[in-house]
Amino acid sequence: MKIIRSKQIRPLMVMAFILVMPQCTNAQFFKKLKKQAEEKIMKKADKKVDDLFKDKHKNEEKEMGHQSGNREEEGTDEMVQEKSKPEEKVSYNYSDYLVYKSPNPAAFKDIVIQKFKELPRFGAIDSYMDRDNPKKVDLSKDAADKRNLTGLGYAGFQHLVRIHMLKEHFKVMDRTALTVPTKGKIIEKEAKSSLAQKVLKEFAFTMGTDALKKEYFMNDWSGTGKSALVREWGGHQADDFTENERYVDFVEKYLDEILEWSSDFFSDGSQDFQLVHAIKFYGQYDFDKGGFWVQLPIERQSMEVSSLDYFSEFSPKTAYGNQMANTMAQVDYINGYVLFKMDPGKAEALINDKSVLLQLTMKVRSVFKAFETSNPFVYGADYTYHFLDPTLELYSDALLTKKIGEIDLENLIYKEPN
């Protein structure tokens, strides 16, 4: 008789458990799985930013498709080390970016992100690909420097948003010692203090200058100043006393200016953005209607790392937004295909141009909704967004310099069901 091993039984038991779970519990279970997946994505993105700045993985440029944000989580990756190297200064033209100046350049780097029409550009950002072939990575030093610069910027942006949204947590955060949560039960003050301390540490390690990281995240056992930097107060294998000493010293010197800096992000619980989506034409050119069909990515959440937090729920505040949402809620129009009018001659030239990368821009406002409460020790927040302008613009390049037309949300033509 064939024996079924325990490794084979375990997945079957998990599936059986899911099937017999009550519907509400089942929904919570899958939501938790989705949350854990997002946490892993953001943590991986944050580590990639660290690697880029330390030049550990030069070949990663060949695979770089998106700029990265950050996702804080309880994790096994917190002991990832990086070699201490001289900090390379990257020069840039301020007018090309949206720059949130560091209040203390000796301690923290500027937050530099892409902009469009003077607003933060989120969603499908420019990955600095080959301009003649957007599927090919530009391997030049200039392109790599820009990816590193804005990659770090998006990570810093998300860290400071979290710090500002957790301002009530920071009011009760223990400034005199690292919080060790009581085992076996959740105490609200401890949970808030612990979470605030974790978010602060992630920000310090990500946005700190090399000098700051050597001071607070290096255990210089060799005495050479070249020991590994580790995402833990005091560095690799620091004892409890050193951990607390470094934490307390950092808080005394820098916390207040960080909190003030964070007030520039979602200052009133909302933030205006230029949200960009990479789109494709659906099917062939429609000669009867005189244009292409495109899918409005309203209910379809972007998989861009920079979009995971702020644009997860569409909550219209205008008549045209509500009308669109109601139409797309109908089965016949659930895919959201609308007509993009274009002259046949221009359409032919566009589809034969291999350098085209369709980008749909929309001016939106993201609004903080609520914190997720499933685990008070891990950061999780929900946001809604709505349109601020009924005109969506379509461009054929990642730089958003080659405009090919507009879509008017107040006069949409939907694709009828077949």
Image (spheres, helix red, strand yellow):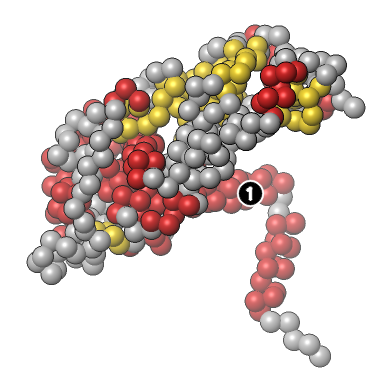
Farthest residue, direction bottom: 1
Up the image or down, 254 lies above or below 399; here it is below
Up the image or down, 406 lies above or below 200; here it is above
- The quadrant where residue 214 appears: bottom left
Neighbours of disc 1 within 10 Å: few (<14), some (14-19), many (20+): few
The image position of residue 351, as x and y in percent, is 69, 29
Relative horizontal placement of residue 89, taking residue 181 as reference (left or right): left
Residue 255 in view (yes/no): yes
Residue visible at 73% across and 63% down in the picture:
16
Which residue position holds label 1? Answer: 30
Relative horizontal placement of residue 226, taking residue 311 as reference (left or right): left
- The quadrant where residue 233 appears: bottom left
Q: Amino acid at mark 1?
A: Phe
Residue visible at 67% across and 9% down in the picture:
410
Disc 1 secondary structure class: helix
The image position of residue 362, as x and y in percent, is 55, 20
Residue visible at 49% across and 45% down in the picture:
137
- The quadrant where residue 80 appears: bottom left
Farthest residue, direction left: 223
Q: In which quadrant of the rendered image does the N terminus lie?
A: bottom right
The image position of residue 256, as x and y in percent, is 19, 33
Up the image or down, 148 lies above or below 117; here it is below
Q: In which quadrant of the rendered image does the C terminus lie?
A: top right
Residue visible at 85% across and 21% down in the picture:
416
Residue 195 in view (yes/no): no
Depth order, front residue of 20/54: 54
The image position of residue 105, as x and y in percent, is 17, 35
